[in-house]
């Protein structure tokens, strides 16, 4: 696990995170994450063939920063 430089958040060292994992890491509900995708252009998770969101570590860091700015 690596400590994020931008926040007091420990993010596991892996390529992609599902929305439930991001929700657990950030303390935000999944519906908030989905809404923020429409409001903040920097949050743009990849999608699997079945449409599931896959967030990168950079996405998780940005979400955490936004949370603490609001």
Image: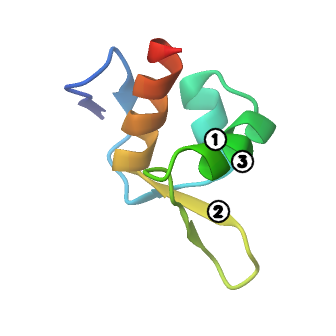
Give the x, y percent position of residue 64: 46, 27
Q: Quadrant of the C terminus?
A: top right
Give the Cα separation between the discs numbered 3 and 1.
6 Å
Quadrant in the rendering for residue 52: bottom right
Furthest-bottom residue in view?
49
Tell whether label 3 touches label 2 (CB within 8 Å).
yes
Give the x, y percent position of residue 39: 61, 44
Closest to the camera, between mark 2 and mark 3, is 3
Q: Residue at x 72, y 43 (%)?
A: 35
Which comes before the other along the chain, label 1 or label 2?
Answer: 1
Closest to the camera, between mark 1 and mark 2, is 1
Quadrant in the rendering for residue 5: top left
**For residue 49, which numbered disc appears in the image?**
none
Looking at the rendered structure, the number of numbered marks drawn on it comes to: 3
Q: Residue at x 47, y 26 (%)?
A: 66
Q: Dot 2: few (<14), some (14–19), or many (≥20) neighbours within 10 Å?
A: some
Give the Cα separation between the discs numbered 1 and 2.
13 Å
For residue 30, side relative to residue 39 (left or right): right
Give the residue number, with chain letter if any, for mark 3.
34
Give the x, y percent position of residue 68: 46, 14
């Amino acid at each position: 696990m690596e400590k994020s430089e931008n926040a007091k958040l420990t993010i596991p060292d892996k390529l992609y995170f599902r929305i439930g994992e991001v929700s657990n890491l950030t303390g935000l509900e999944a519906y908030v994450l989905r809404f923020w995708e429409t409001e903040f252009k920097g949050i743009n998770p990849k999608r699997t063939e079945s449409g599931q969101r896959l967030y990168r570590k950079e996405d998780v860091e940005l979400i955490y920063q936004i949370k603490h700015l609001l």
